[in-house]
Image (cartoon, rainbow, N blue to C red):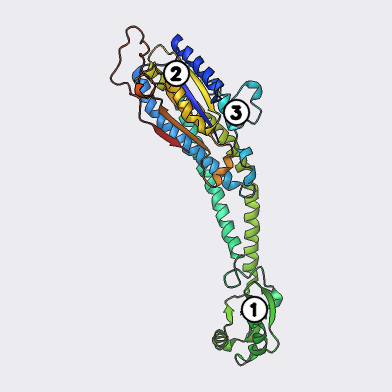
Amino acid sequence: MSEFWLISAPGDKENLQALERMNTVTSKSNLSYNTKFSIPDFKVGTLDSLVGLSDELGKLDTFAESLIKRMAQSVVEVMEDSKGKVPENLLANGGLKEKLKCLKIDLTSFVTHFEWDMAKYPAKQPLVCVVDTLAKQLAQIETDLKSRTAAYNTLKTNLENLEKKSMGNLFTRTLSDIVSKEDFVLDSEYLVTLLVIVPKPSYAQWQKTYESLSDMVVPRSTKLIAEDNEGGLFTVTLFRKVIDDFKTKAKENKFTVREFYYDEKEIKREREELSRLLSDKKQQYGPLLRWLKVNFSEAFIAWIHIKALRVFVESVLRYGLPVNFQAVLLQPHKKSSTKRLREVLNSVFRHLDQVAAASVLDVGVCGHPGAAARQPRLLSLRLFPHRPQPARLGAAGPTRPSRPCGLRRRRSFPRPRNPTELRV
């Protein structure tokens, strides 16, 4: 599982130097691979509007995560016979440089090469409009997902119910695909053919006794037409008026009469229904999988754009105006090195106090999205403030970056929140 941290720090000279020190330390210690994460300059509007957007983006982020989780699970369910190929169908196509838009981009590459899509989400628009565009896009994808998967799942359920009838032992499974017209005496006023399940150890006993279980049993009328691990299915022909007596005597001898009446029209209808459902499922499979692949990609790309927006909004709220911050993407080399990496961050950015603490966005991308078949955690994104450790733990509290002239701190500004985990 690859994990990514997105760090936002003020863009003044002191903090840019701190970022360079961080790059040097993490590179020499082989802690992480770092790249700049480009976020365009948006129309900020008022700081009060950013506070509202911060809450709205949090909800939209959670919704996007849930949607992507459901879409990933739907891909797994649709590709029930090809689960090994699930990862190659969960991609982020396009969204990178223009010459790469036609390529299939895996999720990790998309995160590491993220570029804001100016065509879909123009940065010149007010932030609220950009957020509204993303929200509408995801809402439409969810609506389509519900309708498409509901139709497919209904078809799949009906097919499974029919297929289950042909499974199991001779006591429970359907017999329409086992018996044939030649096995029965049909259209007789006096005679009827019954089906009897006989345990395998009792085959010989059945052959010796079935004619004497009741009066009016047709001699030499029994025939084995099917068997499973437990027993065999035999036919026997007798007069209609002794059916009840024959059933009673058969039960006493541990032979089970299976209730079945041969109806050629009903058997034909069942076979046609099964054939129709198989054909319909095959016809829907391709279009549904293609839709899931395309819209999973769209939803994932929108999700990362939402993360970029959250970094922008939270950075402006924490560092103030004018907008001046730098976002850097860190990819820890080993999970065991994350503790050391946090210590480096606390040390390098110890000059930031808690109110203006750097925002850390962890973006974890599983290397095998198909693992959603067992635990549908395709992605794991966590957003929480990065708080430098107290001085007594080795990270001294620094001076706060200067605010623009004339900008007073507003009480309505959100203070850094407690660590919050958002998981898929």
Front position among marks 3 and 2 = 2
Task: Please provide percent x and percent y for residue 423.
Answer: 46, 37
Q: Is residue 107 visible?
A: yes
Q: What separation in Å lies between label 1 and label 3 (alpha carbons)?
A: 61 Å
Q: Is residue 129 visible?
A: no
Q: Which residue is mark 2?
A: 348
Q: Are marks 1 and 2 in contact (CB under 8 Å)?
A: no
Q: Quadrant of the N terminus?
A: top right
Q: What separation in Å lies between label 1 and label 2 (alpha carbons)?
A: 79 Å
**Other-residue count near label 1 (Cα within 10 Å), few / some / many at <14 / 14–19 / ≥20:** some
Q: Earlier in the sequence, mark 1 or mark 3?
A: 3
Name the residue type under label 3.
Answer: Ser
Judged from the image, the secondary structure of the residue bearing numbered disc 1 is helix
Q: Which residue is mark 3?
A: 109
Front position among marks 1 and 2 = 2
Q: Which mark is residue 200?
A: 1
Picture layout, residue 198 above or below residue 17: below
Task: Please provide percent x and percent y for residue 288.
Answer: 60, 43
